[in-house]
Amino acid sequence: MKRILLRSGKSPYDVVPVERALQEDVFATNSGNLIFSDATHKILETPRAKVVSNGITTRVADADRINSEYDVFVIPLANAFRPSFERQLERLTQLISKLKIPVVVPGVGAQTGVNYSADRLKPMQPTVYAFVSAVLDHSASIGVRGEFTERYLRDMGFRDVDVIGCPSMFLGGSRLVVREDGRSLGPESRIAVNGSHDAVRKHKLGQIIDRTHARYPHLRFIGQNLSDARQLHWRDLSHQNAAVTDIPTHPDHPMYGEGKVRVYIDPVTWMDDLRGFDFSFGSRIHGNIAALLAGTPATVLCGDSRTLELCRYFDIPHRMLSKVPADLDPADLHTAADFGPLMRGHQERFDRFVNFLDKNGLENTFTHGDGGAAFDKQMSGLSFPPGVRPWIGSDPATMAPRLNWLQSQLTELTAENAQLKRKLLKNASLPAQRSTYQRARSVVGRPIKRALRPSR
């Protein structure tokens, strides 16, 4: 039995209540992370492999334990080659350098603009170089998301680079079917829209959402940030993202008051809900991948290299966010979208992904297992919390769960505080212990003082 340690916020089998999920940040600030980590878990779980979630926090001190308890460390990453992730990348490098087991990275990306210029990444190039070098010291190759990241690493001199996209797209293995019924979108259509705070603030996505909301009464916005979820569940406006009031997750936005906003803690409930929609669009790559995996047509509005290179690799319908008009009608995106290349090329891309796993000594459930049947069965038997909704009521049904959770937290913190006080009192009652330096100084200092004392 191969023991696989997987870097992920939580195991797909972990049912975490909403309040705890938001407190512990189980999806590392962006719920899209769980889509590719859950997919990786499913893919790697075979009769001869056990997959265990490591959590997101990197502890270099865990190296010895990891070496003794696991056979391979798998690190699925998204846009990790970006300045804001540099410190985490440094810690990962330190950990990997202390490991004696294989380390496999299936699908990492670099983030810059849609022009693919790597200039903004130059200051962190030594960090990226050290990370990739450490990975390749422990594996046959490194998997990257697309053409830009491949070129970025090859320009540094790396040759063992495989373009494999993102594991999320292979949740169903070689099978990917997107519904194409030929019907046009109309006022009664159910449309999902997604987008980041940057896309709303710096581009025209806020205007696009507002105009779509006016045209389509059944529009739903799906957020992905931890701050989005906290705004919905707690009306927490302490994060800097709360300054963006034009995004539907903000309590001042009309869609919030109408209850037309969600954030999902678990990919399974996210995709289940999206199966009931007619179309999805927006700037979030995994928000739209979730729709495609659910069989729902989707178009990505690309605002950076991380979304663009994945769309180009998988032939996902896309437009440049900077070039779409503010009065964009999603019906036009829906009509123009061609999912033929995406579906026809999926088998070849899946084979390339499997070859990458084989090269790095990893089996997969579709070739060496039951195709994920056991995984799907176990998931279907679990009761995950529904998507987080806007808190727009003050009735007992909405207040009670929140108050109960706060009361439980108060009880736990009170108990911990009392325990800490007992420890402090116990330590205070003990004789003061002098440090080694103080003891040495007193022993050595006496004869020196006597020697220096003037004679009488």
Image (tube, rainbow, N blue to C red):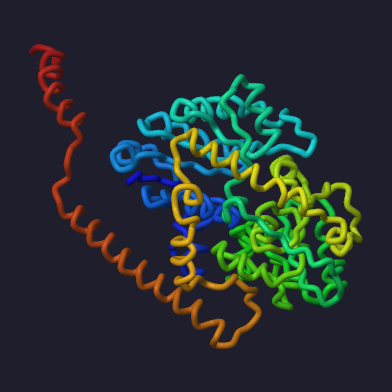
Q: Is residue 268 above or below residue 157?
A: below
What residue is drawn where x is 51% and y is 77%?
Answer: 402
Q: In this view of the protein, which residue sits in the foreground, 234 or 47?
A: 47
Q: In this view of the protein, which residue sits in the foreground, 174 or 95?
A: 174
Q: How many marks?
A: 0
Location of the C terminus by quadrant is: top left
Q: In this view of the protein, which residue sits in the foreground, 330 or 238?
A: 330
Q: Residue furthest left?
A: 456
What residue is drawn where x is 59% and y is 23%?
Answer: 159
Residue 27, percent from left and from top: 53, 56
Answer with the quarter of the image where residue 278 lies: bottom right
Asked if residue 365 lies left or right of residue 415, the reply is right
Asked whether the viewer can see residue 299, the reply is: yes
What residue is drawn where x is 28% and y is 39%?
Answer: 68
Residue 75, percent from left and from top: 49, 42
Answer with the quarter of the image where residue 337 lies: bottom right
Asked if residue 240 lies left or right of residue 23, the reply is right
Residue 54, percent from left and from top: 41, 49
Asked if residue 399 lies left or right of residue 237, the reply is left
What residue is drawn where x is 65% and y is 54%?
Answer: 286
Residue 109, percent from left and from top: 63, 38
Asked whether the viewer can see residue 245, the reply is: no
Q: In this view of the protein, which residue sits in the foreground, 346 or 122?
A: 346
Q: Is residue 320 above or below residue 375?
A: above
Q: Is residue 149 above or below residue 416?
A: above
